[in-house]
Image: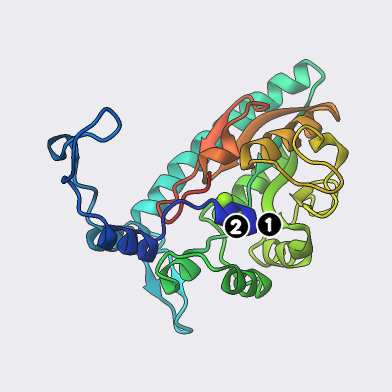
Amino acid sequence: MSTLRRSTKVVGVAAACALAGGIVYGTGAASADHPTGKTTAEPHNIGLLVKEIKSYYGATQDADGVWQASADSAYADDMARITAKAERDIDRAAKKAKKHGEKPAVVFDIDDTLLLSLDYEIKTNYVYNSASWADYVARADRPAVPGTPDLIEYATRKGVEVFYNSGLKETQRASAVENLKKVGIDVDLDADHIFLKDTAAPPAYLSGCATATAWNCTTVQYKSGTRKHIEDQGYEIVGNFGDQYSDLEGGHADKTYKFPNPTYYVE
Ligand SMILES: [Mg+2]
């Protein structure tokens, strides 16, 4: 959820409402690029969608007024199913890698893959703002995405190296590390394992989309380029975990795991 990531975030509720207010759907002249009203499907009602999202997370406010996901929510159920499958896959992949003399690794996005931003999303009405987001990250007080500290601990126990591939800024490194530790994720939190977006001094392995003076990497280029860099150090990436499709596209992983996140979209 860095500047770049959120600048490409497609829809926030307020933005979508403003947009809807300015457009009369289903009218106007038909053309090849502009279908008639009869072909236009009415989008999901945004007021109902907000309710569905809260219900999906079982969102409730704790004693401090912080929105939390409930342990018995559909979201928690989905996460339990995904992480259980991932553990079975990791177990198999670790055995296979050992047999073939490979170094197995897993790669995790951070925002809403390991650290849940639900409180921020609800309180901002799902609309990103760079200043409020920076403050939120700096508090280093996000809860874990359900089941992920155990999943990372499991991978480590199976001899699988853990890497983090995040759109957080290099300047947010200390907050990210502090927050991960706080939720019980304390594996490989050094600079060789946590890759953050350094637009001011892009690494040489991103030379396909960034120079020393200009950053032009899409999320997919940045994240897949980072995975290639990990592979180039001799690791076999057996699993890549993210809450956005842009975390997962671009190859350089044997398997991908899409975590649920209905609150924003990052291109
Ligand atoms: Mg994310």
Kindly tell me whether mark 2's CB lies below 8 Å from ligand 1. Answer: yes
What's the residue at 47%, 49% (across, down)? Answer: 265
- Residue 179 % position (x, y): 68, 66
Looking at the image, residue 99 lies above or below residue 45:
above
Asked where in the image residue 86 lies, by quadrant, the reply is top right
What's the residue at 68%, 39% (across, down)? Answer: 223
Colour convention of the picture:
rainbow
Q: Neighbour class for label 2 at 10 Å: few (<14), some, many (≥20)?
A: many
Residue highlighted by disc 2: 1
Does any portion of residue 130 appear in the rendered image?
yes
Residue highlighted by disc 1: 168
Q: Residue furthest left?
A: 38
Q: CA distance from mark 1 to mark 2?
A: 6 Å
- Residue 20 % position (x, y): 27, 58
Disc 1 on helix, strand or loop? strand
Looking at the image, residue 46 lies above or below residue 152:
below
Please state which amino acid type lies under the numbered disc 2.
Met
- Residue 199 % position (x, y): 77, 52
Q: Earlier in the sequence, mark 1 or mark 2?
A: 2
Which residue is at the front of the view, 97 or 9? 9
Which residue is at the front of the view, 117 or 206? 206
Please state which amino acid type lies under the numbered disc 1.
Leu
Which residue is at the front of the view, 204 or 143? 204
> Any mark on residue 88, and which?
none
Looking at the image, residue 102 lies above or below residue 244:
above
Disc 2 on helix, strand or loop? loop
Instruction: Give yes or no for contact between labels 1 and 2 (Cβ–Cβ under 8 Å).
Output: yes
Looking at the image, residue 209 lies above or below residue 11:
above
- On screen, residue 74 versus residue 37, left or right, reads right
Does any portion of residue 160 appear in the rendered image?
no
What's the residue at 57%, 74% (across, down)? Answer: 132
